[in-house]
Amino acid sequence: MNTEAMANRIAADIARYGSVNAPRPHCVDCTRKHLGQAIVLLQESLHGYPLHVWLAIGHMAEAEAEIEGIYPDLAKVIRGARKQVEVDVKNIPNLLEIIHLVTQREDGNASGCGLGTCGV
Ligand SMILES: [Zn+2]
């Protein structure tokens, strides 16, 4: 993320949250990280670790929060997938497809990980 993009993101957080102490920086890389972790945990939930579905649901909620301030429509897609699992833990969404959607959308200015600003 370049300096101008970072300044814009800080300004957006101030406008939205009233301070630079926003709940968290928004980051597409962290979104993908949480979705990837959810994929692993959902697979584990089907193979002997049923309670891991709740860990996956938690990661999906984190993914929603990470991307909500950048691409709110994609946050809704992730939320829909999370709700799908919450209704039926055997109804596993295709989260790799959502990772693909996030990757297609990314414009190069949405990731905070390049400078380590989001703590990844
Ligand atoms: Zn990040």
Image (spheres, grey):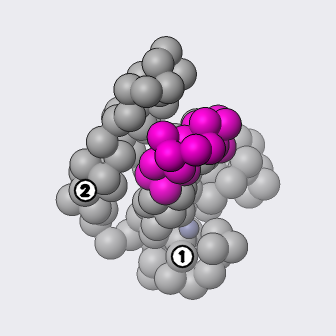
Q: Is residue 98 left or right of residue 47?
A: left
User: Residue at 72% of width from left, 50% of height from top?
Assistant: 22
Which x, y percent locates residue 38? Answer: 51, 50
Binning the other alpha carbons within 10 Å of mark 2 as few (below 14), some (14 to 19) or many (20 upward) gives: few
In the figure, residue 57 lies in which quadrant? top right
Label located before the other in sequence (2 or 1): 2
Which x, y percent locates residue 95? Answer: 35, 46
Is residue 23 or residue 37 the one in the foreground? 37
For the residue with label 1, is its CB less than 8 Å from the closest atom of ligand 1?
Answer: yes
Which residue is labeled 2 in the image? 100
Give the residue at the far top of this rendering: 87
Which residue is labeled 1 in the image? 113
Is residue 21 or residue 80 the one in the foreground? 80
In the figure, residue 119 lies in which quadrant? bottom right
Q: Is residue 23 left or right of residue 90?
A: right
What's the magenta bit mostly, secondary-structure-wise? helix
- Image label count: 2
Which x, y percent locates residue 68? Answer: 49, 41
Please state which amino acid type lies under the numbered disc 2.
His
Distance from Cα at disc 2 to Cα at disc 1: 18 Å
Q: Is residue 61 visible?
A: no
Q: In this view, does 95 lie above or below 26?
A: above
- Secondary structure beneath dot 1 equals helix
Binning the other alpha carbons within 10 Å of mark 1 as few (below 14), some (14 to 19) or many (20 upward) gives: some
Please state which amino acid type lies under the numbered disc 1.
Cys
User: Residue at 30% of width from left, 42% of height from top?
Assistant: 94
Q: Can residue 22 be seen in this view?
A: yes
- Secondary structure beneath dot 2 equals helix
Is residue 6 or residue 97 the one in the foreground? 97
User: Residue at 25% of width from left, 56% of height from top?
Assistant: 100
| Quadrant where ligand 1 appears | bottom right
Q: Range of the magenta residues?
A: 39-56
